[in-house]
Amino acid sequence: MIAQVLSKEQVEKIDRASLEILERVGVQVPHADMLEKFAEAGAKVDFQAQRVKIPPEIVRRLVEGSGKKFAIYGRDESKAARFGEGRRNYNSIAGEAYWVEEAGGGRRFASLADVAAASRFADALGSINIAGAMSDPHELPAEYRCVEVFATQVRNTTKPVQFWFHDRRSAAFINEMLIAIRGDEKAAAEKPLCYPFLEPISPLRFPFNGIDLLYETTRLGLPVPVGPMAQMGLSAPATVAGTLAQQHAEVLSGICITQLVKPGLPVCYGGICHAFDMSTTQMIFSGPEQAIFGVAMTQLGKHYGLPVYINVGLTDSKRPDAQAGLEAGITLALGAAAGADIFGHMGISGVDQASSLDMLVLQDEIISYVESLCRSLEISDETLGLEVIAESGPGGSFIDKEHTVEHFRSELWFPNLLDREYYQSWLDRGALGMDERCRRRKEEILAGHQAEPLSAELERELQRIVKAAKKELGG
């Protein structure tokens, strides 16, 4: 861990404040069975108010018992995202209501066709290892939307996927598809392909469906990231420290919920709080506070030995321009240096205003840059190059040396999008800005990439399950 904004003493002070919040204020849990489980665990439960106050020793016991390492696997099982092992993972957005076709243009409602395009697109990108649906299709009823979204994703990518689960009933059909993809229930549990997301509603509340669907997804032991989006000054205190304390409390209580559903369930600590702009009345995706939040929440999550998910690498800009590059690049570099496990969601235009493949192209490039920045350096007799230095001598050149030929490709990062041309060459090629380079790259991918198709047997089974979900869930 290179980047830190909190001392050890400050981490411990915030943690104590969060535990006091949970013991003195508590959280609202609108789920009868979960209230019973909290009471049995020793928490103070007000069943009428649906309020749970959790003593520190119970929080610590439940969090310490959670699973802290896990992986999710694509239908190509060699494509995996691993958590708790010191690796970095990157996902495109799980879904937005709107879609931007061309950067700088208007928005339209997102559709199921966009899910297919986004999944196929992420399948082609070198830096995105979890393919998000990017679209929350407006034409599908919420009751079975996630079932059809998941089936569409699986058809269009061989990577692990992320989408928005809806509720317990629809999650049962997701489980059925996971079993069909892997071949049996044991294999589906051993190599999960996706995970649900438990998102507390700041301040200090939980949604019924978010809790309830865990009773189904834990059948296959699907890991659970937990993270609210507390907004500083709106749904959390107007101080960085206060927002950190509340967010930390909300995440810890969410992890407690997962462990009461299934002890030992793998979890991910979601440090995804944000600042709030009082002048625009909008959340801030990528101000300097976001970098601070990302690093600080990583420190708080790692204090409990948990894998950590932070919202960095994002931008408030609506197009892949200089603002987007500055905001996404700085926050992602600091978050990666802090040692978080996953960063996202990539491919968002503005502050959850829409999904944009153009923006995802830019962020894929930024991720590649940051990954090179975070690499380990090899210091050896070969890389120190004492012999080639002696061979070249004072005033010599290294351009014609075998040592240069052997090493320059592995030692240097080469961009796909960033401009490094001579000025006249840049003019001769059209003097393209980043917007246009992203657009052209997007069109190349959409025109040229197809994921490995499903077998005819699996395709028939997915169609059967989707049809059954529509019939049973209606909407």
Image (cartoon, grey):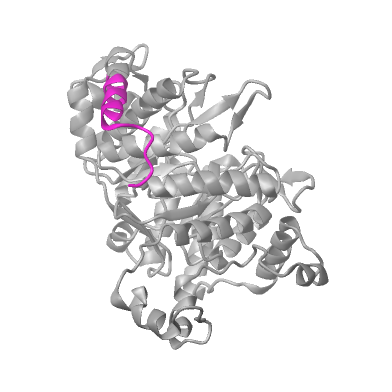
Magenta-drawn stretch contains 189 = no
> On the picture, is 154 further left or further right than 109?
left
Residue 153: percent from left, percent from top = 54, 59
Whether residue 214 is situated above or below residue 450 in the rendered picture: above
Q: Main secondary structure of the magenta part?
A: helix
Residue 363: percent from left, percent from top = 58, 54
Whether residue 147 is situated above or below residue 153 in the rendered picture: above
The magenta span reads 1-19
State the quadrant of the C terminus: top right
Residue 384: percent from left, percent from top = 35, 73
Residue 303: percent from left, percent from top = 26, 37
Whether residue 30 is situated above or below residue 375 in the rendered picture: above
Q: Nearer the viewer, residue 185 or 323?
A: 323
Picture quadrant of residue 377? bottom left
Residue at image location 65% in from the left, 68% down from the top: 445
Residue at image location 50% in from the left, 21% down from the top: 235
> On the picture, is 386 further left or further right than 120?
left
Label total for image: 0
Q: Which of 305 and 39 is in front in this view?
A: 305
Picture quadrant of residue 197? top left
Residue at image location 26% in from the left, 47% down from the top: 68
Q: Which of 177 and 307 is in front in this view?
A: 307
Magenta-drawn stretch contains 15 = yes
Residue 349 can be seen in this image: yes
Residue 138 can be seen in this image: no
Q: Nearer the viewer, residue 455 or 264?
A: 264
Single out the residue that lies furthest toward the front: 394
